[in-house]
Structures are given as C-alpha cells and as structure tokens.
Amino acid sequence: MLLSGLMLPMALAPDRLDALSRLMPFRYLVDAMRAAYVGDYAGTAMLYGVLMSAALVLVSVTVGTRVFRKAGA
C-alpha cells in the first residue's frame, strides 16, 4: 500500500521510493482516482490509470479463464 501511493502521495516520498513505486501497477490507478476527484479527466494520470486498469482486467480474465478450463477438464 505504501508504494502504490494510497496512504501518502508519492510526490512527498523520497526519490528512491518514488522510483520504486513506478513499478507498482496500482500506483497508476491511485493517481487516476486522485485526478478524477479534482476533475482532471483528460490528463496523463487518467490515461495511464485507464490503460493500467485495462491491462489488469485483461490479465485477470485470461488467468481466470485458464483456471476454470483446467478445473472443468
């Protein structure tokens, strides 16, 4: 939770934690939610959040489908 920026905005974190948090996919979702709360729907934070959300949905559906197919076989 710390590296996603959920508890504390990563702009306030030390530079090494900010760089490490960029590897966490939930950071982009949190940043998109913060941008949505202030009404910035056309910013880069919202774009990255939507793209990361779509990627997580794609991975989840793919893994879920494979698990259910194996369980049914």
Image: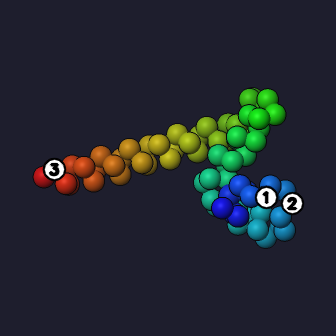
Name the residue at 74% across, 58% down.
Answer: 7
Residue at mark 1 to residue at mark 2: CA–CA distance: 7 Å
Count up the numbered dots. Answer: 3
Above or below residue 40? Residue 22 is below
Along the line of sight, the residue nearer the viewer: 28 or 9: 9
Q: Is residue 26 left or right of residue 13?
A: left
Residue furthest to the front: 7
- The residue that label 3 is drawn on is 72
Residue 26 in picture, x, y percent from top left: 62, 53
Residue 43 appears in the picture as rendered: no
Indicate which disc, 3 or 2, sits on the residue closer to the N terminus.
Answer: 2
33 relative to 55 in the view: left or right: right
Which percent across, then down, holds residue 32?
Answer: 70, 41
Q: Tag on residue 22?
A: none
Q: Quick one: SS at disc 3?
A: helix
Residue 8, numbered label:
1
Determine whether 42 is above or below 73 in the image. above
Question: Looking at the image, is mark 3 or mark 1 earlier in the sequence?
Answer: 1
Tell us which disc is closer to us: 1 or 2: 1
Residue, disc 2: 12
Residue 6 visible in the snapshot? yes
Residue 61's image quarter? Answer: top left
Q: Residues within 10 Å of mark 2 (few under 14, many from 20)?
A: few
User: How much space separates mark 3 and mark 1, taking CA atoms?
Assistant: 43 Å
Amino acid type, label 2: Leu
Secondary structure at badge 2 equals helix
